Amino acid sequence: MERDALEALYSAKTFMTGHFVYASGMHGEDYINKDAIYPHTDKISDLCRLMAEGFKREWIEVVVGPAMGGIVLSQWVAYHLSNMSGRKILSVYAEKEKGHFIFKRDYSKIVAGKNVLVVEDIINTGGTAKDIVDLVRSVDGRVFGVSAICNRGDATKESLDVPELISLVDIKLISWSPNDCPLCQKGVPVNVEFGKGRYFINGGIIPID
Ligand SMILES: [Zn+2]
C-alpha cells in the first residue's frame, strides 16, 4: 500500500527539496507539495482507493473532509467505498470560519447519527483532523476513524481520540527553528513560492490557514 501511494506521490512531483518554511514556522529542506497532486485525477483516485481499502470492512455511511483539499478526497473515498461495499456512501465537507471548522449547507443533518470516516491529505500536528472529528461528534456523528494520505507528524489514533488512524505514507521531515537552521547559516535562499517562506522573508507573522 505504501509503495503504491509513494509511486503516485512521486509521479505527481509532490516531494520537493530546497529551503522551506513550514506552517509551524520551522525550517527544513523537504517539502510535500500536496497541491501538485490534486490536478491529476487518476492519481487522486488511486490514492483515495487505497484510503478506502483501509476502511472497506467498516460500516461507513458518510465521509467527511476539511475544505479545500478534503472536498476532493471525501468525494473520491466515498466513491470507492461505495463501489467496494455496494452501498451508497455519502460525501460532505466542513468549512473553516473564524478559525473553526463548521458544517454549512445543512450537511450536519447528513452526518447526524451516521458512521463517519474523516479524511485528510497531509496530517502535520493533527489539529485539523481533530477539529473535524470533534465537529462530527458535536452533531452526533460516530467517528470510525481517520484516513490520511500522509502522516508527517506525531499524530496517533490516541492523540486524535479515534478508533483507527490509517495513513498511506508516514514521513518524518527533519526541521529546525530559524535560529538553528543550517540552510539559513549557509545562506541558502528561502523558497518563497511554496510553504510560508514569503512571510519569513518579510519578517511577518505566518497566518494560520
Ligand atoms: Zn532556514
Image: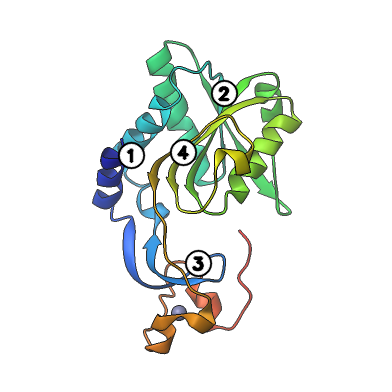
Helix, strand or loop at disc 3? loop
Left or right, 206 with reference to 194: right
Evaluate if marks 2 and 4 touch, with contact meaning CB atoms under 8 Å apart.
no
Determine crowd level at label 2: few under 14, some 14-19, many 20+ residues with C-alpha closer than 10 A: many
**Is the residue at mark 3 in contact range of ligand 1, meaning its CB lies under 8 Å from it?**
no
Residue topped by disc 1: 41
Left or right, 130 with reference to 170: right
Choose mark 2 or mark 3, whichever is in front: 3
Q: Is residue 73 visible?
A: yes
Choose mark 1 or mark 3, whichever is in front: 3
- Tell me the distance, in whole angstroms, between the alpha carbons under discs 2 and 3: 32 Å
Residue topped by disc 4: 72
| Mark number displayed over residue 129 | none
- Tell me the distance, in whole angstroms, between the alpha carbons under discs 4 and 1: 9 Å
- Tell me the distance, in whole angstroms, between the alpha carbons under discs 1 and 3: 26 Å
Q: Residue placed at 50% from the left, 54% from the top?
A: 153
Give amino acid for label 3: Tyr
Choose mark 4 or mark 3, whichever is in front: 3
Q: Quadrant of the C terminus?
A: bottom right
Helix, strand or loop at disc 2? strand
Q: Quadrant of the N terminus?
A: top left
Residue topped by disc 2: 62
Of callouts 4 and 1, the N-terminal one: 1
Of callouts 4 and 3, the N-terminal one: 3
Q: Nearer the viewer, residue 3 or 84?
A: 3
Residue topped by disc 3: 22
Vertical side of 37 occupied by 27: above or below: below
